[in-house]
Image (cartoon, helix red, strand yellow):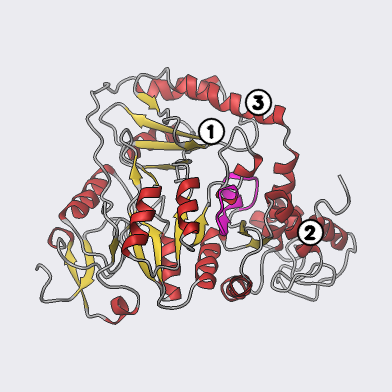
Amino acid sequence: MTSDYIPLINALRNHKQLNSTSFHVPGHKNGLFFHSSILEDFQNVLAYDVTELDGLDDLHAPSGAILEAQKQAARFYEVDETFFLVGGSTVGNIAMIYGSFERGDYVFVQRNSHKSIFHALQIAGLIPILLPSEIDNETGLAVGITEQTIYKAIQMYPEAKGVVLTYPNYYGVSLNLEATIACAKKHNLLVLVDEAHAAHFTIGSPFPPSTLKQGADVVVQSAHKMLPALTMSSFLHLNYKQIGPIRHNIKEALAMFQSSSPSYLLLASLDAARAYTEELSKEEMHEIIAGVQAFKEELATIKQLEVINWPERYHCDPLKVTIRTKTNLSGFELQSLFTNNHFFPELADEKHVLLVFGLGKMPISTNMVSSLRKSLEGYEVVEQGNEQVPAITPTIQLLELHGAEVRQAKKKKVLLEHATGCVAAEAIIPYPPGIPLVLAGERLSKRVVDEIKQLMKAGATFQQEKDVKEVMVIDSEDDNE
C-alpha cells in the first residue's frame, strides 16, 4: 500500500501525532471535555473529530487530502469525478437534481423513488412526470423501468429534459436497465440514478453492474448502506466528461446543501470504505457469498419461511436476502420474532422481511436459526394467495398539482376513509423504506386508501405520523367530502 492510498486518513493521523492544543471547534477539544457516561467508548475517535485545519483540506474547496481521497474513489469507480457526501444519499439526490435542471423543467421520475427524490424535485421547482415500475408477480415489489415505458413517456412528453431512476430497489433487485438508459440517452435525456444500495456493485461479479457501467450520467450511492462506512457517508459520481455547466451547478448545489462543518469522521470513513472494498480478493468474496448462501439454505429448512429466489432476468444483490412468511403472520410480526431472537432485520413490509449482509464473514451460529425455528414452530403454514399489486398508479402521469401550487393552496384535514378522490396536500410515506405511497399533489384513489389501511393493520409505521388517521388534502369544492 502506497502512502497516498488512504490520503485523508493519513492526513488525520499526521495531525493527531502533533499532540496539539485545540483552540478551534468542535467544543470537546479533541476529547478533553465529554460526558463521562460515554467518554471511554468515544475517547479513541474524538481526536479525529476535527475541523478544516492546516493540512486537513476543505470539503467545499478541496485541494489537498480530501481532493486526493476523492480522486482515489473516482479512480476505483472509473468515473470522471467523485464527491464525498456527509448528509447521506439524501443530500446527494437533492444536489444531483437541483444542479442538473432548470426551474420549470419536465423530468421523468420513477414512481417508487425514495422521498428524497421528490423533495429534490420540489426544492428545484421541477415538474415530475411519474413513470410506473414493472411489478414482480411473485412478491408484488417494484423492480424498475422498462425500455418500453421510457420510450412511451418520451413520445407523450418530448419536452422532458431528463429521467431519474432507482437501481436497485431496497431489496437489492432490479431489471437490467441498460436498454432503458440507452433509450433515454438516444433521445438526449440526462440520466440520473439513485443507486443508494449499490456502492459495492463496482466490485463486479458476483454483483450486478452499476448503472455507471450502463451509461448513467450522475449517480448517487450510500457508502454506509453496503460498504463499511459510517452512517450518512455517501458518494456522488459524475460519469465521464459531464457537461461543464451541470458539473459546476452540482458542485455549487453541494456547497449549498451540505454542512459548512462536515464531519471528518464521515469523510475518513469514505476513504477507508473505498480502500477496504478495493482490497477484497476474489477468494474473500467467494467466502462471503458462500456464507450468505449457507445461511439462506439453513433458513429455508424452516417450513414457516420462504427464502425468495429471484428470476434470472433480474439483477440481484447476493448480499440481500428476502424472506416471506408462509403463515398468517404479517412481515412486521415476523420481524418482531426475528428481533426477539436477536436477529435485527433491515426492514419488513406486509409479507416480507429483508436481511442485509456485509462485505465480510458474518458471525452466524446454528443456534440463531434453531432459536428462530423454535419461535415459529407453533405457527401453522397456510396456503399463499396471489400477491396484491402495490398501490402505485400503473400509468405515466402528471400530478394534479405540484410545487408552489400545493404550498399556496387552501388545505384541510379529512379522515382517511373520506379521502378518496381528494388531492393530497402531504406525502404519505411508510418507513422504511421511505417510498411515498401518496405524493403531495396526487389524487387519492380508493385503491391507495385501502392499501394504507391494510399496511396500518399489518403493523407498518408511517412518517410523520405512526398511524394515518387523517390526511391533509387540498380544500376544493370538487373533492369528495
Q: CA distance from mark 1 to mark 2?
A: 31 Å
Residue 469 x, y percent position in the rendering:
21, 59
Is residue 463 something that shows in the picture? no
Which residue is rendered at x = 51% and y = 60% of the image? 192
Q: On the image, which quarter does residue 374 sit in?
A: top left
Position of the C terminus, as image quadrant, is: bottom left
| Residue range of the region highlighted in magenta in the rendering | 213-230
Query: Whole-percent x and y of residue 360?
Result: 65, 34
Quadrant showing the N terminus = top right
Quick one: label 2 or label 3, which is nearer the N terminus?
Answer: 2
Judged by depth in the image, the label closer to the viewer, 1 or 2, is 1
For disc 3, the marked residue is 287
Which residue is identified by label 2?
8
Q: Residue at x 44, y 33 (%)?
A: 313
Give the side of residue 235 with respect to residue 282, left or right.
left
* Amino acid bearing label 2: Leu
Q: Is residue 418 left or right of residue 199?
A: left
Alpha carbon separation for disc pair 3 and 1: 12 Å
**Which numbered disc, 3 or 1, marks the residue that appears first in the sequence?**
3
Q: Nearer the viewer, residue 469 or 59?
A: 59
Question: Is residue 186 or residue 368 the one in the foreground?
Answer: 186
Q: Position of residue 463 (x, y in %)?
A: 36, 59
Name the disc covering residue 318, or none: 1
* Crowding near the residue tagged with mark 1, few <14, some 14–19, many ≥20 C-alpha atoms within 10 Å: some
Secondary structure at numbered mark 3: helix
- Disc 1 is placed on an element classified as loop
Q: Secondary structure at mark 2?
A: helix
Residue for point 72% across, 66% down: 33
What crowding class fits label 2: few (fewer than 14 Cα within 10 Å), some (14-19), or many (20 or more)? many
